[in-house]
């Protein structure tokens, strides 16, 4: 998928990279379950990201224009990034302070 620099201009590539990052953060929640049981991902942001992703991955089936697809890719990447940033901020806020 990422064999040339032009591959990074693909909307699918951007969404895949954002999904990999979001999955890594969600995996961190599972691995740190005992110390951060109250930390939950923002569901509405993840649902918005999934809806944007579906629109970006299937533009011809949904009859979407190129500019709308680019906006949906930006929305998907942005929503997954904000969701991940909120979770990581929660990890930092709840971590023990070194003395």
Image (cartoon, grey):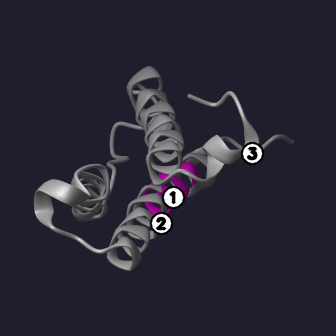
State the residue in front, 82 or 60: 60
State the residue in front, 29 or 66: 66
Quarter occupied by residue 26: top left
Residue at horizontal 33 percent and vertical 76 percent from the top: 68
Mark nearer the N terminus (3 vs 2): 2
Does residue 6 lie above or below 1 as drawn?
below
- Secondary structure, mark 1, is helix
Query: What secondary structure is the magenta-colored segment mainly?
Result: helix
Residue at horizontal 82 percent and vertical 40 percent from the top: 98
Please tell me the numbered disc located at residue 67.
Answer: none
Report the residue marked by disc 2: 78
Report the residue marked by disc 1: 81
Residue at horizontal 48 percent and vertical 66 percent from the top: 78
Highlighted magenta segment, given as a residue range = 81-88
Q: Is the C-beta separation of discs 2 and 1 under 8 Å?
A: yes
State the residue in front, 54 or 64: 64
How far apart, in angstroms, are the residues tagged by discs 2 and 1? 5 Å
Q: Position of residue 18 (x, y in %)?
A: 50, 47
Report the residue marked by disc 3: 97
Quarter occupied by residue 47: bottom left
């Amino acid at each position: 998928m990422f064999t040339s620099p032009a591959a990074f201009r693909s909307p699918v590539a951007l969404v895949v990279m954002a999904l990999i990052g979001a999955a890594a953060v969600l995996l961190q929640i599972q691995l740190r379950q005992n110390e951060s049981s109250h930390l939950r991902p923002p569901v509405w942001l993840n649902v918005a990201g999934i809806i944007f992703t579906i629109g970006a991955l299937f533009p011809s089936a949904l009859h979407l224009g190129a500019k709308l697809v680019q906006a949906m890719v930006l929305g998907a990447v942005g929503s997954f990034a904000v969701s991940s940033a909120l979770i990581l901020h929660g990890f930092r806020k709840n971590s023990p302070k070194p003395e």
